Amino acid sequence: MNATTSEPVSLRLLDREFHIACAPEERAGLVAAAQFLDGKMRELKSNAKVPGFDRIAVLAAVSIAHELLTLRKDQASQEQVLTDGLAALRKKLDGLVDASVK
């Protein structure tokens, strides 16, 4: 991304406004991510004993990172199950082809 293709985007997190430059094609995703983060921060703020902005931001970041890593682990596990299943099917098909050739 270079300066000629970026544009400022205004994002609100816990009623604070932030301006971030991004490529036009990234705008919608960035806005959606900020809305998701704002929702997570508001959820944490309602349960926080010390509702400082920085603390809530860090807690939200850790929570979202944990969710991401859990999803990645689950996806990798599902991919392995699929790969194993496809390998078993290929082995059966190879056996059937070998049997019909003989």
Image (cartoon, rainbow, N blue to C red):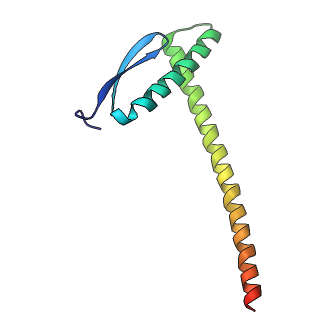
Q: Quadrant of the C terminus?
A: bottom right
Residue nearest the observer in this picture, 41 or 92: 92
Q: Residue at x 68, y 50 (%)?
A: 78
Residue 94 locus on image (x, y percent): 71, 78
* Number of numbered tags placed on the structure image: 0
Residue 70 locus on image (x, y percent): 64, 38
Identify whether 73 is placed above or below 44: below
Determine which quarter of the picture holds residue 36. Answer: top right
Q: Quadrant of the N terminus?
A: top left
Residue 49 locus on image (x, y percent): 62, 7
Q: Residue furthest bottom?
A: 102
Residue 65 locus on image (x, y percent): 56, 32
Q: Residue at x 53, y 15 (%)?
A: 55
Q: Residue at x 48, y 23 (%)?
A: 34
Q: Residue furthest left?
A: 4
Residue nearest the observer in this picture, 1 or 44: 1
Residue nearest the observer in this picture, 50 or 79: 79
Determine which quarter of the picture holds residue 2. Answer: top left
Identify whether 2 is placed above or below 55: below
Identify whether 37 is placed above or below 1: above
Left or right: where 22 falls relative to 65: left
Q: Residue at x 69, y 67 (%)?
A: 87
